[in-house]
Image (cartoon, rainbow, N blue to C red):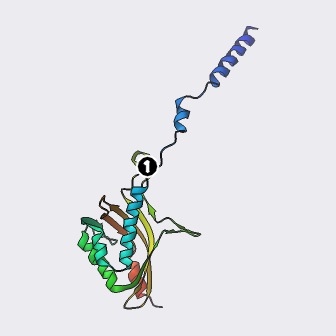
């Protein structure tokens, strides 16, 4: 009888503790975080879009006006990871204007069944360094043009990291695309 009574008492104690309400841990999990203010992001995206449009329009003066005088640029080809300046970027853009016509930019990541957003910023992972700022824009798209001398249409997938200051000027830009792929497209036999 004592064994049965002891067993019932243990069952009652276990039931009592197992039904205890969850405390702060559950409350923390349901907290809603505030959405970040996207106005800073939207302004910076507008600057980069305007810069790309000025490149399509072959407007070197507009391009120059959108770059900070002390801006840093990393070109798409490997150069020992040396950062170049505003004049270097403008010279490269002028070379494209001299050698290509009908320069066009299509914004976005091309997926099998759609085209996804072309601008991203902030991060979720890794957690210890995640942020919701628009400090660095990640830009994805496709450039196309007609090579002036050969008349060949070329295209290149494009990735860029850009930073825009409070004055609305691009202060840092790092380009990634297949420079040799452009030459191969121009030299290819039809």
Image quarter for residue 72? bottom left
**Which residue is outermost to the right?**
1
Image quarter for residue 17? top right
Q: Quadrant of the N terminus?
A: top right
Tell me residue 164's x, y (percent): 33, 61
Tell me residue 98's x, y (percent): 32, 85
Residue 17 vs residue 62: left or right? right
Residue 82 is at least partly visible in this image = no
Residue at image coords 44%, 67%: 140
Tell me residue 134's x, y (percent): 39, 56
Q: Above or below — where is 120 with respect to 189?
A: above
Residue at image coords 37%, 58%: 136
Residue 63 is at least partly visible in this image = yes
Of the pair 152 and 77, the residue shown nearer to us: 152
Q: Above or below — where is 52 with respect to 164?
A: below
- Which residue position is annotated with label 1? 126
Of the pair 9 and 166, the residue shown nearer to us: 166
């Amino acid at each position: 009888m004592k064994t049965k009574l002891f067993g019932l008492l243990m069952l009652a104690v276990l039931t009592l503790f197992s039904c205890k309400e969850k405390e702060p841990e559950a409350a923390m999990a349901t907290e809603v975080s505030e959405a970040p203010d996207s106005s800073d992001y939207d302004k910076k995206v507008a600057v980069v879009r305007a810069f790309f449009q000025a490149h399509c329009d072959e407007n070197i003066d507009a391009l120059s006006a959108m770059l900070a005088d002390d801006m840093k640029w990393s070109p798409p080809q490997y150069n020992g990871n040396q950062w170049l300046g505003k004049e270097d970027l403008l010279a490269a853009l002028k070379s494209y204007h001299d050698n290509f016509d009908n320069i066009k930019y299509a914004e976005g990541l091309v997926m099998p069944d759609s085209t996804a957003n072309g601008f991203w910023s902030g991060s979720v992972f890794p957690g210890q360094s995640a942020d919701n700022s628009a400090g660095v824009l990640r830009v994805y798209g496709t450039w196309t043009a007609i090579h002036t001398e050969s008349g060949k249409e070329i295209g290149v997938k494009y990735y860029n990291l850009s930073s825009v200051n409070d004055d609305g000027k691009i202060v840092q830009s790092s380009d990634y695309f297949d420079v040799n792929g452009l030459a191969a497209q121009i030299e290819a036999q039809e």
